[in-house]
Image (cartoon, rainbow, N blue to C red):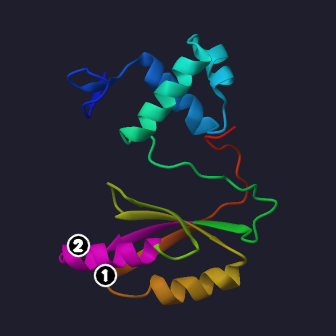
Amino acid sequence: MREFRKSFGGPMDTLDDFDQRILDLLRMNSRRTGEQLSDLIGLSPAACLRRVQRLRKIGAIDREVAIASARFRDKGTKIIVLITIDRQNPRLMDEYCNNLRRQDEVVSLNWVTGDDDIVMIAECKSMADFADFSALYLNETPVIGYKTLVSLKEYDTICD
């Protein structure tokens, strides 16, 4: 079990198996009702909703978002970018990453292990738009180099 903050009279909040199952189910569809959660995990609808409220309160649920269908988004090209950066100035690296993640094209940004330092997923309307984006954001300090992978087809997401 994972321990969280104090609440509900217990010494520490912990996430039990029911909480973990609720989190897993809500990750796939955050619009599930208490009734639906109840049917899937075996607690009453009211108990499920109380747990969801508690999970929000303690920060186990960070936020809820809508995942727009690719058919309806105006950004039809998904590009995975492997970025190598100069790690000698951590402040500069943080500033760069904070600036990058504020860009509309950036869907995901992760600092990773291995030969590359950052994996970015970007969505652009076209390759020409990505060329403009890369000229602005991938050819500046602290970027040493980058490689791109263009997604031809997305097979699966966590939210099926």
- The residue singled out by tag 1 in the image is 142
Where is the N terminus found, in terms of image quarters? top left
Where is the C terminus found, in terms of image quarters? top right
Considering only vertical position in the picture, is 50 above or below 159?
A: above
Of residues 100 and 153, the one nearer the viewer is 100
In the image, is residue 92 part of the stretch drawn in magenta? yes
* Element on which disc 2 rests: loop
* Element on which disc 1 rests: loop
- The residue singled out by tag 2 in the image is 87
Residue at 61 percent across and 85 percent down: it is 131
Whole-percent x and y of residue 45? 61, 19
Residue at 66 percent across and 38 percent down: it is 31
Give me the C-alpha separation between circle 1 and circle 2. 8 Å
Whole-percent x and y of residue 44? 58, 13
Q: Decide: marks 1, 2 in contact (CB < 8 A)?
A: yes
Of residues 85 and 100, the one nearer the viewer is 100
Inspect the image, locate mark 1, and give the three-letter code of the amino acid beneath it: Pro
Inspect the image, locate mark 2, and give the three-letter code of the amino acid beneath it: Arg
Q: Residue furthest top?
A: 42
10 Å crowding of disc 2: few (<14), some (14-19), many (20+) = some
For the question of whether residue 135 can be seen, the reply is yes
Considering only vertical position in the picture, is 35 above or below 25?
A: above
Whole-percent x and y of residue 156? 68, 43
Provide the residue span drawn in magenta: 80-101
